[in-house]
Amino acid sequence: MTTVFLPCAYCGATSRQRPHPYTCSRCLDVKYCSKDHQLRHWKEAHRVECRGAGGKKPTLAEQVANLRLAMLAHAEKTRSISAEIAKAGAERDRDRGCREKVAEEKRNAEREVAAAQSELKAKSRDVAGWWWRWSLRVFLLAGYEASSEWGDPPTLTAGQAASLAEGLADRGWAFIDDFIDMTAVEKMRTCWLDRYSTGTGDFERGRMGGGRSGQNIKYIEEGSRGDFVRWLSPQDDDCPVGYKWLRAGMDLLVQGLARNCRCAALEGVDTVVAQSSMVAIYPAARGGNGVGSRYIRHIDNPIGDGRILTVMVYLNPEGWSLDSHGGALRVFHAMEDGSEVATDICPSGGRLLVFLSDRLPHEVLPVTGDHHRVAITTWYMDFAARARATCEEPSLAETEKLRNEMARMGGHSVDDDVTAA
């Protein structure tokens, strides 16, 4: 019998001698006869079809959450079968065969539950081991090895680390200047603005909503949030080395904070995981009115989705000023007497800002100059809290709240197919 291997997912060409040499590294489900066909198929179709949200491979949190959902399903199945067994017991004289059949189903369900529990325990051990490796060698997470162009990842001095820890503990936010130098800023800024302007960077309008799980209604309202974003992981095929270098520095920074910062937000957190980073471009003022894009006042995580630390680095040109260019990050700090103090932070190139994701109100003021405002942000999450949030199906109450919010703000949905539980 002649063996015919999987066809190329782009052109349909088959092979009878050996498998096609290229495979999608995310889903492992499709093969290609050439690298060119793999790239074309990704851009034209597969990025939407690929396993995982937005073509992303499921995160560890998502994998564990799925296992937990499976366990809940198996447990519910066992309870249902137990009820059937009780009913069959009452009717055993009339239908002994039904009783035996239901008992066998119960044994099968119990075996499924045991297998799911074993898989979950194994995954938990994998996660624990993964975090241990992350603590010792962050490069395993960021995928960065020192290169001749970028060198070692950016690090903090002892004084900078102490300043960040003190600011987080006292007011929930802190920043330090020159985390990366202007040469690195310009290289990364040029890279992302080129991709944005040529349409090759996969940027999309910033979205609001999503709910605790991130699977509920998302909507766009340009007057409230006017940035364009690209979600980026160190594992992405088109991930620049410069981002891996910066991400490694961010990971090292958070590792140090988790070890040394006496901050209430980090207490009781056993495992910290990192979300994909977000490259955000706020377009410059246009139309001659001197007012560009902005993002209204909000809290990154007001609903317990697991995010605990927001870490961002600004990639703006030298000489950026609030008077000439705008785009300040305005943070709000509650005082003991109930009043509120607002502080405007200039998005200076190379500046690193850290704040508590679940309690700091902030907004991005309008960009008023002729330069785009660029920043890279990474969220660090409590693994257990993130897994719980990911498990949740959108509730009717949450969905209705988001619909009302979207209508009030005049936004339009990008997820009309949300199903509420």
Image: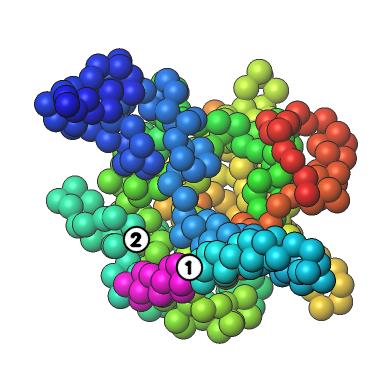
* Residue 149 falls within the magenta-colored stretch: no
Kindly identify the residue that appears in the image at 60 percent across and 31 percent down: 205
Kindly identify the residue that appears in the image at 22 percent across and 25 percent down: 4
Kindly identify the amino acid type of the residue bearing the numbered disc 2.
Leu
Residue at label 2?
Answer: 141
Kindly identify the amino acid type of the residue bearing the numbered disc 1.
Ala
Kindly identify the residue that appears in the image at 74 percent across and 49 percent down: 394
| Classed neighbour count for the residue bearing mark 1: other residues with Cα under 10 Å, few (<14), some (14–19), many (≥20) | few
Q: Give the range drawn in magenta.
A: 117-133
| Classed neighbour count for the residue bearing mark 2: other residues with Cα under 10 Å, few (<14), some (14–19), many (≥20) | many
Q: Residue 115 carries which label?
A: 1
Q: Where is residue 332 in the image (x, y as percent from the top left)?
A: 73, 61
Image height check: is 265 above or below 220?
below
The quadrant holding residue 193 is: top left
> In the picture provided, is 409 more to the left or to the right than 349?
right
Q: Is the magenta stretch mostly helix, strand or loop?
A: helix
Quick one: SS at disc 1? helix
- In the depicted view, which residue is nearer to us: 27 or 186? 27
- In the depicted view, which residue is nearer to us: 296 or 389? 389
Looking at the rendered image, the disc whose residue lies closer to the viewer, 2 or 1, is 1
Image height check: is 26 above or below 411?
below
Residue 53 in view here: yes
Residue 154 in view here: no
The image quadrant where one finds the N terminus is top left
> In the picture provided, is 324 more to the left or to the right than 115?
right
Q: Position of residue 229 (x, y in %)?
A: 53, 37
